[in-house]
Image: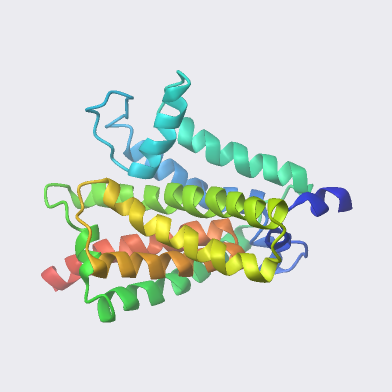
């Protein structure tokens, strides 16, 4: 086991203990915890399957990017992004040799913690960003609220997969393993780089660039990256999804209040 642990990035060694703080990092526990979110997006998006055709609508850009990657190699299937999440977390679980456990109490704690972590993003969006980011999240008036909620759940999963789990891991390999930077010097670079790219990614769709939304999402990206590193992928995903759902629900409550 020690040999396998030594091959992991240093920040991934969170989760080496057996208390709540550590178990919430375990890849298998993260997978079990986010499985409802995976299923919600997979079922909700089944009515509008993505195809590699240039004029095919992308319901969620991160989801579409993963599908385009596979389509480049001639593999097409709406299930592929979900399969990637499951395969990565299971492979990570096997490499770590963590116990095979199912712990509902743990998942309730992770859900509650995710909701708490999401609240500062919501407050920041309202107070600092003057609601501009929330308006951008709700900028598709022709889309039903149910569809917005499905996309919000998918964004929590697949944007965190790309910009936290994959990108932060790759940046860690580049800066720490290849270039030999210390973890203390590398982590700020990793967090800021992933946050800026995360913010810019949102303008790949129809949304127009503004400094307010760019600043907000960069700050949110820094925050989510820190949650990913220090609290694990599962809580990171659920925090992102919880914020997006609250950003959709709060304006609806205000309008109908």
Residue placed most toward the observer, 6 or 100: 6
Colouring chosen for the image of the structure: rainbow
Residue 254 in percent (x, y) is at: 16, 73
The answer to whether residue 98 is seen in the rendering is: no
Residue shown at 74% from the left, 42% from the top: 94
Q: With respect to residue 74, does 215 lie above or below? A: below
Q: With respect to residue 171, does 62 lie above or below? A: above
Residue 205 in the figure: left or right of residue 29: left
Residue 179 in the figure: left or right of residue 45: right
The answer to whether residue 2 is seen in the rendering is: yes
The residue lying furthest to the right in this view is: 2
The residue lying furthest to the bottom in this view is: 127
Residue shown at 31% from the left, 29% from the top: 49
Residue 59 in percent (x, y) is at: 28, 40
Quarter of the view holding residue 218 = bottom left
The residue lying furthest to the front in this view is: 179
Residue 176 in percent (x, y) is at: 69, 57
* Quarter of the figure that contains the C terminus: bottom left
Residue shown at 53% from the left, 34% from the top: 83
Residue 195 in the figure: left or right of residue 110: left
Residue placed most toward the observer, 255 or 105: 255
Q: With respect to residue 50, does 206 lie above or below? A: below
Q: With respect to residue 88, does 102 lie above or below? A: below
Residue 163 in the figure: left or right of residue 184: left
Total marks drawn?
A: 0
Residue shown at 26% from the left, 77% from the top: 126
């Amino acid at each position: 086991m020690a040999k396998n642990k030594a091959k992991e990035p240093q920040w991934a060694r969170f989760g080496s203990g057996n208390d709540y703080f550590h178990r919430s990092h375990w890849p298998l526990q993260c997978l079990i915890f986010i499985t409802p979110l995976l299923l919600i997006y997979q079922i909700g998006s089944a009515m509008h399957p993505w195809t590699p055709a240039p004029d095919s609508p992308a319901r969620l850009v991160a989801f579409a990017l993963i599908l385009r990657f596979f389509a480049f190699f001639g593999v097409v299937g709406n299930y592929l992004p979900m399969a990637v999440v499951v395969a990565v977390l299971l492979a990570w679980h096997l490499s770590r040799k963590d116990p095979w456990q199912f712990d509902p109490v743990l998942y309730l704690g992770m859900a509650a913690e995710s909701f708490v972590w999401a609240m500062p993003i919501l407050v920041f969006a309202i107070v600092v960003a003057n609601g501009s980011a929330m308006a951008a999240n709700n900028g598709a008036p022709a889309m039903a609220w149910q569809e917005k909620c499905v996309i919000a759940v998918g964004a929590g999963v697949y944007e965190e997969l790309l910009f936290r789990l994959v990108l932060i891991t790759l940046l860690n390999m580049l800066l720490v393993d290849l270039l030999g930077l210390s973890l203390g010097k590398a982590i700020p670079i990793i967090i800021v780089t992933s946050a800026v790219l995360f913010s810019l990614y949102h303008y790949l769709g129809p949304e127009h660039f503004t400094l307010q939304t760019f600043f907000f999402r960069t700050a949110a990206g820094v925050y989510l990256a820190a949650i990913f590193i220090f609290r694990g992928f599962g809580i990171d995903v659920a925090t992102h999804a919880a914020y997006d759902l609250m950003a959709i629900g709060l304006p609806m409550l205000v309008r109908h209040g």
